[in-house]
Amino acid sequence: MSRNRTKKTRAVENHRAVGLAQALQSLPLFTDTYLNMQAINLDLIDQFIEDQETRLLHEYFEKERTPLPSTMFVSALCQLWIFGLYELLRTWRQRGKDLLRWSKELHALPEGDRPARLLAKRREIEKRAADPEGAEVFHWPVYEAAADPAFGETLRKALDRSERLFRRIEAFRVTLAKHEMPGVPGSFAMAPGYGRIDMTDGSIYWQVVLRGNEVDIVSRRTLADECKRLALDRRPAIIPERVRDQMKRYPDDSYGIKRIAVTVDDGIEHPGVYVAWCKEIVGIDGMDDALPFDPDRIASIRPDPRDKHDADV
């Protein structure tokens, strides 16, 4: 077995050893009682569905044809589980972004003005809560914690490294729930909700048309496994915030992906850099794994569209 294959196998074993609740609880803000409850709920149903997926695959092999009732049942469970996962991640990310905005606002004030602003924010949180008396216990502590820059940085990194996974689930959810292609309101998705049995694990997989000829093939088990990887000590190559707004103005090379050239602080330019959602470097032309530069050292960027020869290929 090759070294790469061995490393890949170990990575799969490691993330499968981590439960979904444990993975989500490793993220900041999941100390919140109710976010944590939803994480546990999703984990319990994930375990139940995995068992049903395994049974479905065995039944398929025994009958040598698709067992329709079992397939419909597993497909229904998978779709509803994905809706639940999407809503939990959406809520977590929305709350995280709100906290980062608050942290930025607070630290922009002179130090002497911060205690008064903290008190005003606390009163605001109490008014926003359905149970004002419980706000001090359930809602205010994370806003108070955001006064610590280290907490804000931890939260920012967690949001950044979850971006690609969330966007994938988001695109799938639009197809599944709204029957539209992601980012194209009023469009008609291809066979929304129609899935097939994955012959490797019994999970249901779907083909999601992103745009044009771009199709994502995604299964429930794949999404669950990607969520579990959030608990791993993964350090994705994240583009500095100082260039993200500029990058948003560049055209997409493919769905959610921009192709840019980056110049680092030593003056060397690296073309053919692919960035997902203006945040994570996901590939560089002509290179496999190792990144030839530190993303934090990026000094400037520019669009790097494919030339005619690349487009023809």
Image (cartoon, rainbow, N blue to C red):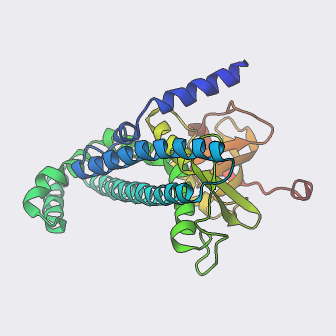
The image shows residue 307 at horizontal and vertical percentages of 87, 56
Residue 233 at least partly seen: no
Q: Given the current orientation, which residue lies at the most extreme left position? A: 133
Residue found at x 38% / y 40%: 154
The image shows residue 267 at horizontal and vertical percentages of 71, 38
Classify residue 172 as left or right of residue 32.
right
Quadrant into which the N terminus falls: top right
Task: Please tell me whether residue 121 is drawn above or below residue 24 in the rendered image.
Answer: below
The image shows residue 199 at horizontal and vertical percentages of 66, 44
Residue found at x 44% / y 55%: 81
Exactly how many numbered labels are in the figure? 0
Task: Please tell me whether residue 129 is drawn above or below residue 297 in the rendered image.
Answer: below
Residue 56 at least partly seen: yes
Classify residue 68 as left or right of residue 15.
right
Classify residue 37 as left or right of residue 206.
left
Task: Please tell me whether residue 311 is drawn above or below residue 52 in the rendered image.
Answer: below
Q: Nearer the viewer, residue 131 or 193?
A: 193
Q: Nearer the viewer, residue 67 or 266?
A: 67
Q: Given the current orientation, which residue lies at the most extreme bottom position? A: 186
Residue found at x 58% / y 66%: 193
The image shows residue 90 at horizontal and vertical percentages of 41, 59
Res 270 quadrant in image? top right
Q: Nearer the viewer, residue 56 or 9?
A: 56
Res 176 quadrant in image? bottom right
Q: Given the current orientation, which residue lies at the most extreme front position? A: 63
Quadrant into which the C terminus falls: bottom right
